[in-house]
Image (cartoon, rainbow, N blue to C red):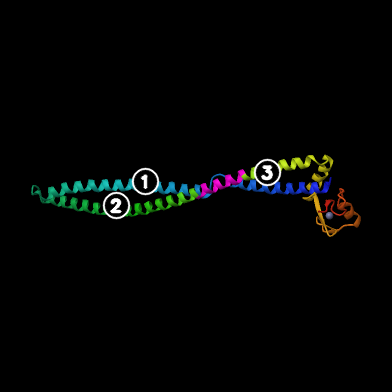
Amino acid sequence: MNVPRQLYQLQEIDQELESNEKALREITSQLGDSEAVIRTREQMAREQLELEELGKQQRSVEWEIDDLSGKLTTAEKNLYSGRIRNPKELSNLQQETAALKTRRNRLEEKALEIMDQVETADKNVSRISSDLKALETEWQHQQQQLAANLAEIKGTLSRLKERRQLLADEVDPAVIEIYQQIKKQRGTAVARVEQGICRGCRISLPVTEVQQTRSGNLVRCSSCGRILFLA
Ligand SMILES: [Zn+2]
């Protein structure tokens, strides 16, 4: 049984496990609400409120115009009825009619302004609404994709864990312990030997160490302490 080879395989599985766990964390952090969607929903709510507010103003101004028009009709009827002969009273009525007309003109101008604002707000609401729809669709698509990736990674992780367990079961627990300790200290526990050099620390190994490694013995690099493996 070539223990270094087994440990090297174990290391490869561990590295795959780590990269999959990293991907899992990344995906998990991307799952959930989208900032852009939330912001756009808030913007939409504000614009709708604005539109409602303008609608109220519009109705109120229109109502006032109607009211003034009614008063004006009555005043004009009186003015031209010929019933009022008193010059003072006539003059008052003329002034009243003129004042009503001025007020109505002002309100009509205001109504036009509000109409413009309503039009703008209306356009804003449609624009934001279509933006929101696009963002939500994209977000949903992305979330579905993430969920699918997540499921795949979870499957990979569980297969890797199983393989690791099977492999680790074949190795002496004391050796596994050494492997774990070196891994903790150095990041990687097993180093390949290539052309007599430890790939872990890039130092030339004594010939005896290389020979021992070649015969499949558990040899640790005299320089970095990693378990040596010769493919
Ligand atoms: Zn080394």
Rate crowding at label 2 as few (under 14), some (14 to 19) or many (20 or more) other CA atoms within 10 Å: some
Residue at which label 2 appears = 111
Q: Where is residue 88 drawn, in percent x and y?
A: 13, 50
Task: Say which amino acid is labelled 3.
Answer: Leu
Q: Where is residue 164 drawn, in percent x and y?
A: 74, 43
Q: What element carries label 1?
A: helix
What residue lies at 21% left-to-right and 48% top-to-bottom? Answer: 69
Task: Say which amino acid is labelled 2.
Answer: Ala
Task: Say which amino acid is labelled 1.
Answer: Glu
Image-based side of 150 in relation to 43, left or right: right
Q: Which of marks 1 and 3 is in front?
A: 3
Rate crowding at label 1 as few (under 14), some (14 to 19) or many (20 or more) other CA atoms within 10 Å: some
Magenta segment: does it hold 46?
no
Whether label 2 lies within 8 Å of ligand 1 gets the answer: no
- Marks 2 and 3, the one that precedes in the sequence: 2
Q: How far apart are marks 2 and 3 (CA)?
A: 66 Å
Region of the chain picked out in magenta, as a range: 138-151
Q: Residue 157 carries which label?
A: 3
Residue at which label 1 appears = 52
Regarding residue 28, the answer to whether it shows in the image is: no
Rate crowding at label 3 as few (under 14), some (14 to 19) or many (20 or more) other CA atoms within 10 Å: many
Q: Which of marks 2 and 3 is in front?
A: 3
What residue lies at 62% left-to-right and 45% top-to-bottom? Answer: 152
Q: Where is residue 142 drawn, in percent x and y?
A: 54, 49
Q: Distance between the residues labelled 1 and 2?
A: 15 Å
